[in-house]
Image: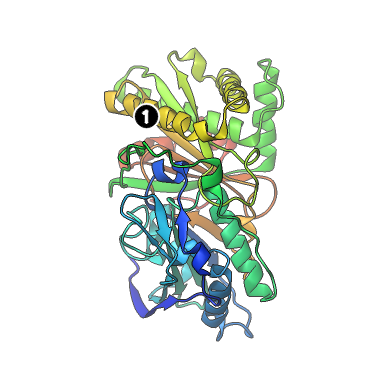
Amino acid sequence: MASSTIISRKMIKLLSPTPPSLRCHKLSFMDHINFHLHSPYAFFYPKIPQNYSSKISQILENSLSKVLSFYYPLAGKINNNYTYVDCNDTGVEYLNVRIDCPMSQIIDDPYNDAVGVVFPQDLPWSSSLNRSPLVVQLSHFDCGGIAVSACTSHTIFDGHSLSKFINDWASTARNMDFKPSPQFNASTFFPLPSETNLSSTLPTKHPSKRHVSRMYNFSSSNLTRLKDMVTKESHVKNPTRIEVASALVHKCGVTMSMEKSGMFKPTLMTHAMNLRPPIPLNTMGNAVCIILTTTVTEDEVKLPNFVAKLQKDKQQLRDKLKDMKKDMMPLYTLELGKNAMNIIEKDTHDVYVCSGMTNTGLHKIDFGWGEPVRVTLATSNKNNFIFMDEQSGDGLNVLITLTKDYMLKFQSNKELLEFASPVVESTK
């Protein structure tokens, strides 16, 4: 197990102070009901050009200082009942850390859990209330490679907002004249109603140490094979790569569950849907609704049937939202979230959670020294599938988190391995 040593810790201040008129950033109802934790992303760069090696930290600090002037809520403090951010320019926590191993020891580990060393201890997926809404760590490996990790408050940012920020930060690092254009106006679309019950939020569960994660790759050719198989055996039209890949990992999860229990258990799979549009693309904050897809028979688990069901659920949600007033969307999202939590608490279904960070550019984040060889997250809760673009080509990487005993069964599933391969082969 690699260990780390903190070389320095500082607060990065904004290059330009936040105007008094922007001091109070009102959180939206969607922000208020969301998970109040830090989302942890890491970017690995193994080869740093000679002309950059001595000034990496300075480049990151200077560009972060400038981009924070546009993303000022990240340098403030979230109030105790999650209704606003005091944009007091406290700054962002920034750590310089030495890792006592080569990068290959981390990214060549078959289990993704090894990446935890590039995040501040105990911060990933933990409460964002009493810490800086953004915490950055620059990790230096023995081999000369580096990792840049960012833990951002889910109260302030959803996945779309996070990817916009990271892209803008990288663009600023390459060109200090770059001017981002985020709009922190989500509360105008999703205002907090005056009668809000401030305890009405989605429950937060922290990851267990008994969970492990592995990353699998679906190549473009295998995704095409999956799509062809689904469309030939059903009336499904134009399935997306995430639809067919999530259908496969869902089916593998059901197989694993049946092998362990000896019987079929109904399932619930959730997918996140970005509400941009109709919300403008540069609106920062949380603008996501969830799709709930259930199966109650083994026949519904078959890939063509599940993809058809998923497409139907997505279209029904789109139709529902199309005629809905924007200020009613958070209440509807909260209702869907509570329905899912009720199912989880009753334990009548096996629950799988999907989220996608595709088409965001995160797999190509370049601060000036090239693109990363790996983009990943810290291990999260069980039965969690996070889809990302692969580093090259049109394939998908999926980060799969399960309990340890389930992972041992899952990773040997023949149908999974027919279409997906582990990003790192296991030697254990």
Residue 215: percent from left, percent from top = 49, 48
Residue 360 visible, this orientation: yes
Say which quarter of the image contains residue 419: top right
Residue 325 position (above or below residue 97): above
Q: Is residue 123 left or right of residue 316?
A: left
What type is the residue that disc 1 sits on? Lys
- Its colouring scheme is rainbow
* Residue at the image point whose x is 37% and y is 29% from the top: 338
State how many labels appear. Answer: 1
Quadrant, the N terminus: bottom left
**Frontmost residue, 123 versus 333:** 333
Image position, residue 204 (x, y; %): 32, 43
Which residue does the numbered mark 1 point to in the structure image? 338
- Decide: is 65 above or below 250: below
Q: Secondary structure at mark 1?
A: helix
Q: Residue 129: x, y in percent?
A: 33, 57
Mark 1: give few (<14), some (14-19) or many (20+) Cα within 10 Å. Answer: some
Q: Say left or right for 241 vs 402.
A: right
